[in-house]
Amino acid sequence: MTAATIVPPPWKLKGDGLILLYRFTAQMLEALNVLTPEMGEFRGGIGALMLVDYEESAVGPYRELLLIPGRFRRDGVRGWSISHIFVSTQPSIDSGRANWGIPKLHANFRRTQDGETQGWSVSVGEQTFLNIRYTPGKVAFRVFTTPFSIPLVQHLDGTTYVSRLRASGICKLASLQDFAIDSSFFPEVSQVEPLGILRATTFRMTFPVPKIV
């Protein structure tokens, strides 16, 4: 890692993507090998798998796959935490780790469209480990957060980072056609029924300067 590849916060990001919402139990997450002592105490709440195509960010365009199992309590702070994340560029990896303690790894991403059906595939080297196809609905609606309403708590390399995110977007409900994950690369949440599926046609997020606990 070099200083030249780390772009400090705050970041403003714009893109589109897919959000699958879940309500995991501790037993589910243990079976999926998601929970680690570094994440702290699992406190439940809504979780999500997200695939995002950022067309604008402080480090240029990149794509991202992440899993948020739910809320955790760590070092006296409660908030959501990212357990697994892959992105498509090295500057995003370096900056995400250094700025917010997000454990980013590298992967390759491909998007497809066949009529109304859209898809993503994610691979490491020659191994594709995630495939998903879905069909968006017709009705669009706006989703947004109030300021400072999404605390993200990450612990990496002995440091805990607390970041209060802001996000908004235009979404449509979507229905799954196919979804498969290779569990040797990523938790196999494809075996869990989602609470809902959102196709975000426009997605904006601000990552602020974090508080170091």
Image (spheres, rainbow, N blue to C red):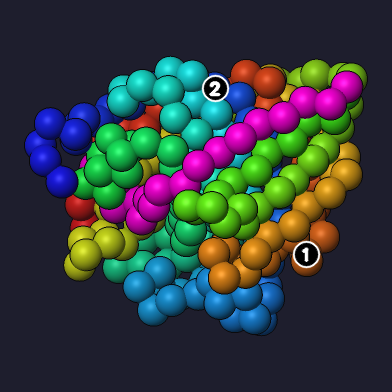
- Relative horizontal placement of residue 87, taking residue 4 as reference (left or right): right
Q: Nearer the viewer, residue 55 or 24?
A: 55
The three-letter code of the residue at mark 1 reads Val
The three-letter code of the residue at mark 2 reads Gly
Q: Nearer the viewer, residue 123 or 204?
A: 123
Q: Is residue 162 visible?
A: no
The mark tally for this picture is 2
Question: Dot 1 surroundings within 10 Å: few (below 14), some, or many (20 or more)?
Answer: few
Q: Residue at x 61, y 25 (%)?
A: 16
Q: Nearer the viewer, residue 182 or 151?
A: 182
Residue 76 figure quarter: bottom left
Per the image, label 1 sits on a secondary structure element best described as loop
Residue 67 figure quarter: bottom right
Residue 192 image label:
1
Q: Is residue 212 visible?
A: yes
Q: Which residues are magenta?
A: 99-115
Residue 200 image label:
none
CA gap, disc 1 to disc 2?
Answer: 26 Å
Q: Nearer the viewer, residue 147 or 90?
A: 90
Which residue is label 2 attached to?
15
- Relative horizontal placement of residue 204, taking residue 189 as reference (left or right): left
The C terminus is located in which quarter? bottom left
Residue 73 figure quarter: bottom left
Q: Residue at x 54, y 52 (%)?
A: 126
- Can you say whether 133 is above or below 29 in the image? above
Q: Residue at x 21, y 30 (%)?
A: 7
Q: Residue at x 28, y 35 (%)?
A: 91
Where residue 169 sits in the image (x, y, percent)? 62, 22
Answer with mark 1 or mark 2, whichever residue precedes in sequence.
2
